[in-house]
């Protein structure tokens, strides 16, 4: 029998989001035209809120709770910063163009490798070494952070402090931009 992960546990929540991210990457590549644009916008949104929540909630705890936690987190943050830069560039490209497909495919490989590294080097250790009650509380904190997080990538904000200082203004701007753009299309 396969053990069920606790849906209120931050590790289970983030692993589930990683599965959703993998699915959206595949959907973007499988579609064209407006369907591709729609899937890409959903992916950008999910990645932006997911990474913000990790940076605000999970990584600070991992730094303190894990042996060599700073090293584990710093490696993940460098990967996240590069992914945000690439996502920003991709948002300016034609999703049906060859440059988009080439860069998107490279980003997909990098993000999936990043997710695997997080799951193996950070999440598994948090599950083994972290306080179970704290992991449940962190799941609620991640959901709260995602509810108010920016919906587009903002390279250079890969810390809890920067996210908390700059994130609210970026989130308001992103969500306003999303609302205005959404008024002119049928998603």
Image: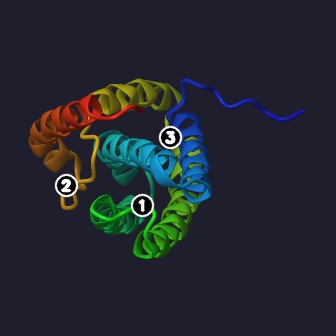
Image quadrant holding the C terminus, namely top left
| Disc nearer the start of the sequence (1/3) | 1
| Disc nearer the start of the sequence (2/1) | 1
In x, y percent, where is residue 93?
A: 32, 65
In x, y percent, where is residue 175?
A: 21, 33
Measuring 27% from the left and 53% from the top, which residue is drawn there? 153
In x, y percent, where is residue 40?
A: 44, 50
**Kind of element beneath mark 2:** loop
Image-quadrant location for residue 143: top left
Asked if 133 appears above or below 62 in the picture, the reply is above
Q: Which residue is mark 1?
A: 95
Asked if 9 appears above or below 123 in the picture, the reply is above
Q: Which residue is mark 2?
A: 157
Asked if 170 appears above or below 29 in the picture, the reply is above
Residue sitting nearer the eye, 76 or 19: 19
Q: Which residue is mark 3?
A: 130
In x, y percent, where is residue 145?
A: 30, 31
**Kind of element beneath mark 1:** loop
Task: Please tell me whether mark 1 or mark 3 is closer to you in this view.
Answer: 1
Measuring 21% from the left and 54% from the top, which residue is drawn there? 154
CB contact under 8 Å: marks 3 and 2: no
| Disc nearer the start of the sequence (3/2) | 3
């Amino acid at each position: 029998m396969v053990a069920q992960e606790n849906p209120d546990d931050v590790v289970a929540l983030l692993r589930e989001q990683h599965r959703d991210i993998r699915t959206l990457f595949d959907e973007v590549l499988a579609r064209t035209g407006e369907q591709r644009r729609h899937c890409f916008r959903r992916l950008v949104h999910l990645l932006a809120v997911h990474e913000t929540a990790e940076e605000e909630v999970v990584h600070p705890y991992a730094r303190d709770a894990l042996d060599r936690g700073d090293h584990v987190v710093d490696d993940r943050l460098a990967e996240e910063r590069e992914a945000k830069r690439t996502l920003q560039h991709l948002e300016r490209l034609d999703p049906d163009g060859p440059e988009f497909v080439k860069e998107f495919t490279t980003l997909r490989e990098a993000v999936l490798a990043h997710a695997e590294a997080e799951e193996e080097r950070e999440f598994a250790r948090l599950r083994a070494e972290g306080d179970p009650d704290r992991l449940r509380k962190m799941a609620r904190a991640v959901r709260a952070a995602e509810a108010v997080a920016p919906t587009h990538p903002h390279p250079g904000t890969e810390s809890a402090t920067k996210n908390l200082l700059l994130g609210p203004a970026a989130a308001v701007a992103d969500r306003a931009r999303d609302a205005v753009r959404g008024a002119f299309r049928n998603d």
